[in-house]
Amino acid sequence: MSSDTHVLSPVPQKLVEEFEIQQSTLKEMEEQRRFSEVQHKFQQFRSPSNLEPRLSRALRELRSVEEATCLLEIASEDPEAIQGQLKHCMRFYRTLSEIKGDVEDIIKAGRKLVEDKAVSEPAKFNLRIDLLKELYNKLGSQVTEAKATLDTALELSLGLQSDIPALQEWLEGVESQLDEQELTGGVQDLTPQIAFVQKSLEVDAPKWSLTKEKVKTSHKAFSSLCDPVYLEVLKDNVNDAMKKWDRIQTRLKNSMDSLQKEQLELAQSKREEFEHSLGEIREWLKGTEQHLDRLDSLPSGQISARDLAECNVRLLLVAHSFVPIQMLPYTY
């Protein structure tokens, strides 16, 4: 059995080798056939008859994008509207990216056809190739610039949408407080009112001034990105905030001057009241002193109970008047 196997084994081995050779040959032939098919298709693809439809289709797609780029022109300060425009912009960008390879191949193949004079009207065909290249590059730049503009506009719009209401709210709060102070008259203690006005002028106003300047700067920048005819509402809102700012600042300064003047007048009134009361006390003391001197000059037996009672009354009246006067603030 072993001997038979040894004799027959070279035959199958030879068949295997031949089979492998034939298989390799067939594989090479198949690859060559496929390559020839691809090469043939590629040649057909580059032929004038096939390039013309591709050129027309590419120009048609680019012109479609060109016509729709009007959607990228900013026509509102509304952030949602701008975000919608950004979506259109990205759609155009994807379209240009998707056809970029085809456009480049059409340009390359078209130049070769013109160079080889493989088209009936090389000059005219070359102009169409130039048009394709110029239109693609123009739209690429236009969409890229529009994307940058829309990004900037969205940032400015979001800032304005937040800053204007916040500034208006602070101004309205200050104005309401000033109105309330003006309606409240005859207040003896002006310290809380002065503290509010002083804080508004020296602490709050400088902080909100930064917001006010940001609103002005953002409005100016946004107006340069959009036709002003679409921004009348935004313009009115900004102008209203600026006018209200100026009005509130003037009222705060006038209120501070008025309150300080009123405080000075109250202090002067209290001083005069104090001096008047002090004069009355001096008169009482002088009369009491004279009464006591008269009593001192009399013999003790001549001092009546009435004299002593009158003296006690005078002393009590002086003491009663002197106590509240000591409580008055010293304003000299």
Image: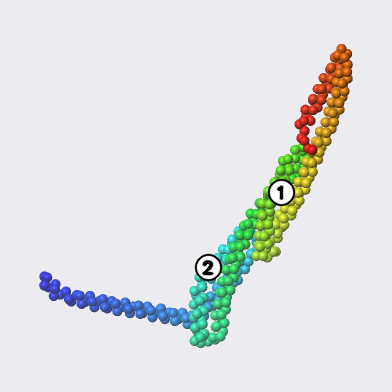
Q: Specify few, some or many for label 2: CA neighbours under 10 Å numbering under 14, 14-19, or 20 or more.
A: few
Tell me which amino acid carries mark 2: Arg
Side (left or right) of 288 relative to 237: right
Q: Position of residue 220 (x, y in %)?
A: 68, 62
> Which residue in the structure is indicated by mark 2?
94
Q: Residue 95: horizontal and vertical position, in percent? A: 53, 69
For label 1, the crowd category at 10 Å Cα-Cα, with few meaning under 14, some 14 to 19 and many 20 or more, is some
Q: For the point 85% across and 23% down, which residue is it?
A: 289
Q: Amino acid at mark 1?
A: Leu
**Location of residue 227 (image quadrant):** bottom right
Q: For numbered disc 2, what is the local secondary structure?
A: helix
Left or right: residue 316 compared with residue 213: right
Percent position of residue 53, x then y = 51, 78
Q: Which marked residue is nearer to the observer: mark 1 or mark 2?
A: 1
In the picture, residue 124 is in which quadrant?
bottom right
Colouring convention used in this rendered image of the protein = rainbow
151 versus 126 height, above or below: above
Q: Nearer the viewer, residue 106 or 327?
A: 327
Q: Tell me how far mark 1 sits from mark 2, CA to CA.
A: 53 Å
Q: Is residue 279 visible to us here?
A: yes
Earlier residue among tags 1 and 2: 2
Q: Is residue 68 above or below residue 18?
A: above
Q: Is residue 135 left or right of residue 181?
A: left
Residue annotated with mark 1 = 201
Residue for point 50% across, 76% down? 104
Q: Is residue 162 above or below residue 127?
A: above
Q: Do the residues bearing badges 1 and 2 touch, measured as CB atoms within 8 Å? A: no
Is residue 29 or residue 183 the one in the foreground?
183
Res 226 seen here: no
Going 73% across and 42% down the picture, which residue do you hit? 193
- Can you give x and y, in whole percent of width and height, for residue 134 in the image? 57, 77
